[in-house]
Amino acid sequence: MATTQKLPAPPLTESIAFSVNGREVQVAAQGHRRLSRVLRDDLGLTGTKVGCDAGDCGACTVLLNGDPICSCLTAVGQVAGCEITTVEGLATRSPLYDRLQNSFLVQGAAQCGACTPGMLVAATALLEHDSSPNENQVMDAIGGVLCRCTGYRKIICAVIDAANGPLQVPSFPKAGSAVGARLVRLDGQKKVAGTEIFGADECPAGALGLRVIRCPHHRARFKFGDLDEFIATHDSVDLVLTAKDVPGVDCYGVIPRFADQPVFAHREARFRGEAVAAVVGEAEKIEALDFLDFPVSWEALPPLETIDQALAPDAPRIHPQREDNVLVRGRVVCGDVDEALIQADVSVEGEYETGFVEHAYIEPEAGFARRVGDTLEVQACTQSPYMDRHDIAKILGIAPEQVRIIPTAVGGGFGSKLDLSVQPFVALAAWKLDRPVRMVYSRTESIVSTTKRHPARMRLRAGATREGKLTALDFSADFNTGAYSSWGPTVAGRVPVHASGPYSVPNYRALTRAVHTNIVPAGAFRGFGVPQAAIAQEQLYDDLADRVGIDRLEFRILNALDNHTPTVTGQVLGEGVGIRACLEALRPHWMRACREVAEFNSQQPRPLKRGVGVAGMWYGCGNTSLPNPSTVRIGLKPDGRVALHQGAVDIGQGSNTIVTQICADALGAPIAQFDLVSGDTSITPDCGKTSASRQTFVTGKAALMAGSKLRGDILKLAGACSCARIEFSAGNVTVFDDGKSKSLALRELPLDAHGYVITCEATFDPPITPLDENGQGTPYAVFGFGAHMSEVEVDVELGTVRVLKVTAAHDVGRAINPTLIEGQIEGGVAQGLGMALMEEFFPGKGENLHDYLIPSAGDVPPIESILIEEPSSIGPFGAKGIGEQAVIPTAPAILNAIHDAIGVRIHRVPATPDRVRAAILAKARGGPHG
Ligand code: FES
Ligand code: FES
């Protein structure tokens, strides 16, 4: 039975005066209200971001009387009479800000931009006190601001550059030379000005707030009490939604064939954090409720938390239709692996485990929905607008055309924002109430309810000849896929194709299972399981090289795939296989590092030991053996400008810029001529999801085709040949051909249905084939390749590991924008370092950024990027993807370096000090290692 919630009498509102960005303000607020909320909600200064509300992320950093503070931990009453400067006020406060903005743009120091305001505030405070800081001082100054995208190195360089003097942002390259240029990102200015709009930065007038009631147990049956009475006794509550309020199909998921997740659980919740109901009402009052009186009763049930528990013969089924709790199996087999292992001159085996990894983007999920006539609009952070549209329409029981998805800027995604988060809740409420409804996840809510990297348990055996040629690999892996399917099928399908690594393995068997448990769903996270597989396969190959007695880098070069060697799926790429070039590019660095390590370790005994490790990677760009088309539309406007409708959501990786660079050169127009039209589903065709390293390759190719078509149409209109030059000016295009010129007055030409003089559209879908029952076929049209070398120092007494340097060679086919590619590599290295040494999410524990540690500025070492260009004729100008590739080899390279330093294998990552120390002690006792 519900009871009326007794709220304590609200503290008195007071009038608090302080100065913000040089302007005196007076706010009526309770003195304990967070300064961050007052700045954002009351004063509209949304440049100050909120990533945690707990002092952990630093996104909310502002200056209080010139010193940086976390505004989320500062009560507005404390700043009475003080001077506050937010990112919006830096320009008037300090001439240094202009320099910082420019150097952030030139260095590519802002990717998604969610941390950028906090970084700029912290950096301004530093430069105001110290005009020429060194690297350590910069790291200290920005140490309280977390960045999940950049790996910090470009931020540090940008601050030092700004200290050294003013820097000009280079002007755009001339027509025809955009590809390959270090162009500053086209959406960069908004990021360094703090004016970028993220999911939580807009709130329509009169919007209601929404809070979700979530299951506090890993598994529980539940019953509601009198919901009507709950509404009746809370005047701030307009509506309570439960499963019975879903008018359409209450089942969604990113892969339609496996869709299995309800918006609200029905009678039994399958994981801690699963939604069972939503409360909608006046935003501030709803936020103040503690829901202790919400009428729901729980009966906790024994959960299946581990792979072993889920696979036990007597385990209950989490989904009745899925036998043995196995969601899906993956399989790739070639040759005769059993016989080859018997015949191998040397063989090694190993078992490796990885844990859950949290995406930890700085921007928690947020957005709002509103009904506009018969249409529902959802404005939220997302990596996949068209997939969202499909599922929201299905949930509401309306046509997809009645749903409009307007993606905001995305403050980091890395795969998790491919899945729905706030969207179904705000959509249902707005549709039902015909009022705008907004929701912003707290950090805890984000961590408990959104997807994670799959934990993996992997077993392997590999064999080789005594000369070191790989002859066989037998790989099997189970992945904890959690309560719902999400991207589990993709992980189970992609890993068997990649678990050989980028090497020729004639006899191969890779079998995988995605296993359901009562844990938050595991989904997409940069690499779709391949980083986990690389941790196992690359450590095992080191063991094999050691057994054969071959240098570990040379072992990889000896076995590297070439253009004409078949992969484990029987695919012969024929071109663009750049792994050998990547590994060979590391050779001089490897020889230098090996020398230095030997010299360091040969000095008198001490607790510090150094080591060097290497690991290779490959990664198929796009979906595995499935269609994944992108469509790009381009329109020539009457004023001579070019509208580029590209729906690839830029989550910080730079697709807005890269796709435009490609299109510009295909058309032969300067970059400055383009107007970007973003991925709003009502005005932009479908460019698919931003994942699987597909946007440069797939959307980039569609942009190249659309640009070439428009060029062709213009030339046809002018009666010119294909080699003619086109010049764009206000209201005109002029075509120069064979010494003659012809001008087209665009305003005199009729407009088409899109409102353009000429519209061209192109679709590209990579050529792939389905895989047969043994996983043989052409799963991807293009692969990216890479290899990382890591130098580490291990304290054998403490078990701590410090990474001293990472050298990263990547074959990107064609470096469309080297600065942005380096940014992807450095960010990937930082995430790989986190995975290797510190990051593990324990369900039900540490659901915040205080206990869940990600690398901060001081953790990331210098990173040297080496760009290799082995072009693929299928990719635009030869380009391949880089987003996922960059993270894959870092962790195994670090783990191999630890082994090189202290002679122990770490079989379970992350290699935290306790695990490293335990492995050292186990080795000393002669037992198995970590
Ligand atoms: S929002 Fe203030 S530190 Fe994270
Ligand atoms: S750019 Fe720093 S969090 Fe994205």
Image (cartoon, rainbow, N blue to C red):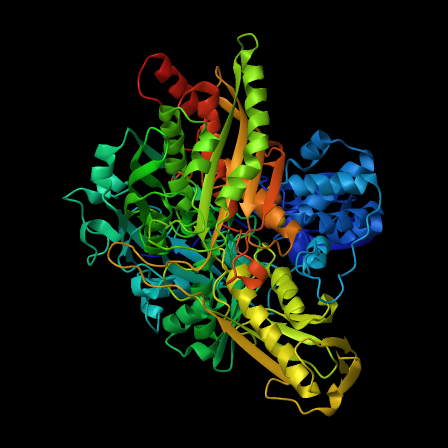
Q: Quadrant of the N terminus?
A: bottom left
Where is 244 relative to 890, above or below? below
| Residue 901 in view | yes
Horizontal and vertical percent position of residue 222 = 27, 54
Depth check: give the residue in front, 545 or 911: 545
In the image: residue 831, left or right of residue 173: left
In the image: residue 566, left or right of residue 236: left
Horizontal and vertical percent position of residue 702 = 54, 69
Horizontal and vertical percent position of residue 345 = 28, 29
In the image: residue 827, left or right of residue 847: right
The quadrant in which residue 32 appears is: top right
In the image: residue 791, left or right of residue 516: right
| Residue 17 in view | no
Residue at the top extreme, as displayed: 604
Horizontal and vertical percent position of residue 871 = 55, 55
Number of labelled discs? 0
Where is 89 relative to 257, above or below? above
Depth check: give the residue in front, 730 or 421: 730
Q: Quadrant of the C terminus?
A: top left
Where is 815 relative to 787, above or below? below
Depth check: give the residue in front, 754 or 854: 754
Identify which residue is drawn at 67% across, 82% down: 714
Depth check: give the residue in front, 141 or 65: 141
